[in-house]
Image (spheres, rainbow, N blue to C red):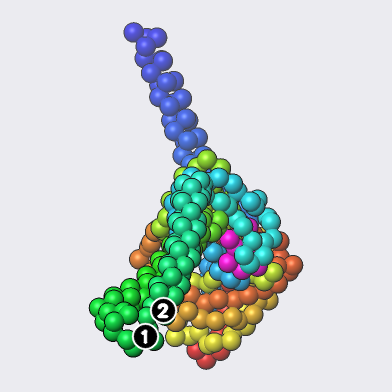
Amino acid sequence: MILRNKLLPIIASMGLVIAIAVAIGSERKTPPAQPIAEPARAPFKSYIGGAGIVEASTDNISVGTSISGIVKRVCVVVGDRVRAGQPLFEIDDRELRAESLVKEASLVKARASVEEARASLRDYESQYALVRGVTDGRAVSVDDVQKRRDALLLAKARVESAKAAVVYAESDLKSTQSAIDRLTVRGPLDCEVLQVNVRPGEYAATGVLSTPLMRLGNLDLLHIRVDIDENDAWRFKQGARAVASLRGNRDLKADVFFVRVEPYVTPKTSLTGSSTERVDTRVLQIIYGFDRNLLPVYVGQQMDVFIEIPVSS
């Protein structure tokens, strides 16, 4: 009993010491976490700030196909510079080429029919010529003359019909040849290949795809699509100076020049590359441009843009 009476005060004292130590430790201030990269700073006294995304000066062109099918050959790789009309990829054309051969044979047959009709016409012309100038009804009857004239007219009609059949066969063949040509998807303009999302043997579908078959763009000059909040839209003045800083390194910045305003306030698109992701904010989109040699940036990269506005705004 005496030993228990001595232990209890000791244990209580130790608990008190521990509680005091914990209380003192909890009062220590945790140092704030340092940012991985310092945020960009505006070089203007009065400005509008906006997030921008780098894109090609031609906009990012999503390439598709007007005729679906299995991809036979891909003619380019990422980074290639292509000329307008240069093949990008080809869809399997075996079925249409077989159809084209059939229509070529039909065209040959139609042209032969024209020659046959013309030969027949010449025969009827000669037969009618024999009786056309005869005035003696005892030599040739009126009925025979009429029949030969009608036969001549019918032969002329057959020639015209055969010619029309040739025109139809030529048009039908050209239609198939045009479809074959459309199976080769070509570059719409001089540009650079940004993405290739299709491989030989894969099925290329038509329509608007969430992931386009290819992305193209002219990168000689780059654009920045800047979103500014609709509440700041009235403060913006066309032609205003702006500076763009690379997201993640504020020291990499450049003066950018005004290109245009897209005068339609739209729901903000989340800068992930997908046009289906929306937020509640509505924004005015302003396009600025700069030479690609000024900054080591890539299409799709985010930038912080500061646009100068009058101090009185």
Where residue 66 appears, as percent x and y from the top left, is 45, 59
Q: Measuring 49% from the left and 72% from the top, which residue is drawn there?
A: 227
As drawn, the label of residue 130 is 2
- Residue 5 figure quarter: top left
Q: Nearer the viewer, residue 207 or 227?
A: 207
- Residue 299 figure quarter: bottom right
Where residue 296 appears, as percent x and y from the top left, is 71, 61
Residue most toward the bottom? 312
Residues at discs 2 and 1 in contact (Cβ within 8 Å): yes
Decide if residue 233 is on the left or right side of residue 194.
left
Q: Is residue 220 magenta?
A: no
- The Cα–Cα distance between marks 2 and 1, rounded to whole angstroms, is 8 Å
**Tag 1, which secondary structure?**
loop
Residue most toward the right? 293
Decide if residue 19 is on the left or right side of residue 50.
left
Q: Looking at the picture, does residue 182 appear above or below residue 1?
A: below
Q: Looking at the picture, does residue 284 appear above or below residue 214?
A: below
Amino acid type indicated by mark 2:
Leu
**Tag 2, which secondary structure?**
helix
Where residue 179 appears, as percent x and y from the top left, is 48, 58
Q: Measuring 67% from the left and 61% from the top, which residue is drawn there?
A: 82
* Range covered by the magenta-colored residues: 186-194
The crowding category of the residue bearing disc 2, from other C-alpha atoms within 10 Å (few below 14, some 14 to 19, many at least 20), is few
- Which residue in the protein does label 1 denote? 134
Amino acid type indicated by mark 1:
Val
